[in-house]
Image (tube, helix red, strand yellow):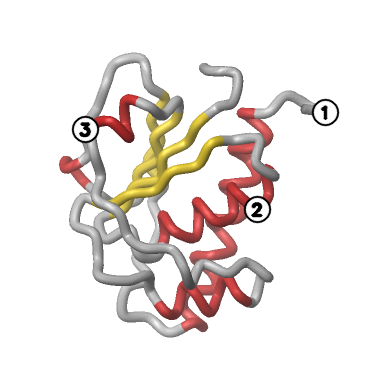
């Protein structure tokens, strides 16, 4: 890994799960990890229920925009975490891959998105512990 580890979160629309995960990682790691997110079929905008759920945590993702997944983004990342993108995610040898089996927040209200958000936070906190040495 490079001096500053990098993580790419990928889901189909890059509108909910991957946006929440990227926002948490940015917020909780305090800039010590390079964070990217993308989707294989990006939506037009970020999921409003995800935006509302994250605002409850004091994290504003309203200005984020879904981005297309590129081969370069995968190559440039130390860790690639997929969230239901199936076989559309490119794989490169030597990368650390994880698939987080999370419910899709698409079409759900904020009440249904909160448990997804909370599970993402728990997983992101574990990831930070794995990527950053104690006291880093």
- Picture coordinates of residue 25 (x, y %)? 58, 48
Mark pair 1, 3: CA separation: 34 Å
Mark pair 2, 1: CA separation: 17 Å
- Picture coordinates of residue 9 (x, y %)? 40, 45
Q: Earlier in the sequence, mark 1 or mark 3?
A: 3
- Residue that appears at 21% across and 32% down: 90
Instruction: Say which quadrant the C terminus sits in.
Output: top right
Circle 3 sits on which residue?
90
Circle 2 sits on which residue?
27
Vertical arrangement, residue 24 with respect to residue 79, above or below: below
37 relative position to 51: left or right? left
Q: Are marks 1 and 3 in contact (CB under 8 Å)?
A: no
Q: Nearer the viewer, residue 110 or 62?
A: 62
14 relative position to 129: left or right? left
Circle 1 sits on which residue?
135
Q: Residue furthest front?
A: 63
Per the image, label 2 sits on a secondary structure element best described as helix
Place residue 88 in its image quadrant. top left
Mark pair 3, 2: CA separation: 27 Å
- Residue that appears at 41% across and 39% down: 8
């Amino acid at each position: 890994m490079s001096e500053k580890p990098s993580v790419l979160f990928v889901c189909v629309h890059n509108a909910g799960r991957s946006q929440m995960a990227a926002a948490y990682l940015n917020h909780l790691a305090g800039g010590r990890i390079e964070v990217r997110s993308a989707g294989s079929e990006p939506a037009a905008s970020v999921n409003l229920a995800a935006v509302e759920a994250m605002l409850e945590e004091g994290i504003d993702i309203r200005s984020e925009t879904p981005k297309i997944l590129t081969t370069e983004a995968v190559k440039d990342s130390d860790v690639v975490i997929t969230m239901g993108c199936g076989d559309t995610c490119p794989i490169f040898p030597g990368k650390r891959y994880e698939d987080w089996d999370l419910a899709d927040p698409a079409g759900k209200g904020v009440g249904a998105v909160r448990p997804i958000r909370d599970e993402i936070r728990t997983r992101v906190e574990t990831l930070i512990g794995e990527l950053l040495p104690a006291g880093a």
